[in-house]
Image (cartoon, grey):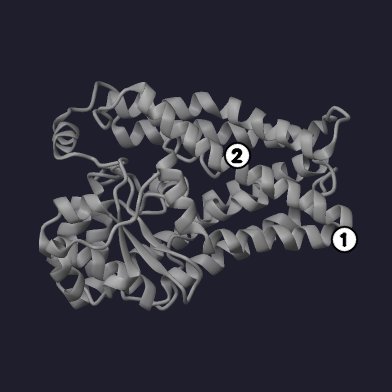
Amino acid sequence: MAVSRSVQSTVSASPNPAGLSWAAARLRLGQVNVGFWVVVAGAVIALQPTLPSVGGGLAWVGLVCAFVVIQAPFDWVGGYLLPVRHGRRSTGFEVWAREWLRGVGVHALAYVLAGWVALAVAGAAGGGAAAVALLLLAFGLVGGQRLMALWMTGAVPEAFPEASMAALKRAGLDASQVEVVDVKDAGFVGGWVGLPGRESLLVPRRWTETLTAPNLEIVLLRRRMGLESGARGQGVVGALAFNAVGLLLALSWVPGSGLDTAGGLWMTSAGVTLWSFLGLLTLPTLSRRAVHVLDRITQAHRSPEGMARVIRTLDRDQEDERSRARLVETIFHPVPAPEHRVTALLEEEASAFAPWRVTRMSLFTSWMTLSWLSRAVHCNGGRPQLWVLFPGD
């Protein structure tokens, strides 16, 4: 599924309609969507509603289906309405609907299976064993991220193109560990997938077709630095640890929580959702730190000018927001605005502590701890091709 050059031209040439910018409109939607689920989670915990007395597995399927239905209007606004209004989508509703159905199917199935595993293990060995099983599933989700991304996008991995092989070699990457994927959503940036020590790199075909050779080389070098510096591994470990704490706190403190009944799963997932919301307010600070660290490491191998050029070029596919208020960035954005990144190239020293993408990895792995926020945030709301590999730096 390719983003053609004509579509890209249309996107870049289309002016924003009157009112909120592309970035501001998506941020507003994310605030409303996340806020909605936080309020629902708080109400569920406070009111302790009773589920119909049906089998635990069947009741859990019903809850997952209810989530899909309630989330659908938010998905439509974020995935279809806003991109069309802002000139970032040229295909019709039926194309988006097919993408959405594919994504919702994968996402919902993952939640159903996680709930069923918890119910089965809790029934056989107790709630503690079921909690361990969910955390092991989250760990397995990291290992299966490549496969999940391909399922979600429908993309077929390809070998790195010969025409761009020189840039790959200059970046110091081995072609055997890199695959190119043709994903329609311009916000897709790929990334390292797999468990630490067994990673492979997914690169959007769009980069190999539209970036100049110097820009592509810097982008690939930065990917290499993200792995070799340990930043990617720190992000994975930090995300898993964050979700483990959230699950254990929900099971310990939320009234009615548990993993042996559908009602207990419901209360547990409500508690985990509130914990995920806390992560959305705190983890972006760590993520932004990692972005700055990798920017500085990369520019040390090339030049500040080259790094600045790439930062500004790639942001046009992402937020298209060169600067923003510091308070807004602190609360809502794990990736700093381009001008903040460019300024930081010369202002700050590199650091060994850089949990790269910890915020968005925590959202992805929270599938297995049953959070309701993994696809309600502004960066991927309604855009299923970004639900497994989130957009970012």
Residue at 60% x, 39% y is 108
Q: Which residue is mark 1?
A: 125
Q: In the rendered view, would you say 146 is above or below 232?
A: above
Question: Visible in this render: residue 253?
Answer: no
Residue at 67% x, 32% y is 40
In terms of sequence position, does the residue under pointer 1 or pointer 2 come before the other? 2
How many residues crowd around disc 2 within 10 Å: few (fewer than 14), some, or many (20 or more)? Answer: some
Residue at 59% x, 25% y is 69
Judge left or right: residue 348 versus residue 122: left
Residue at 35% x, 51% y is 156
Q: Looking at the picture, how far across and down is residue 167, in whole percent?
A: 16, 68
Q: Amino acid at mark 1?
A: Ala
The quadrant holding residue 302 is bottom left
| Quarter of the N terminus within the rendering | top left
The quadrant holding residue 248 is bottom right
Dot label at residue 108: 2
How many residues crowd around disc 1 within 10 Å: few (fewer than 14), some, or many (20 or more)? Answer: few
In whole angstroms, how far apart are the C-alphas of marks 1 and 2?
25 Å
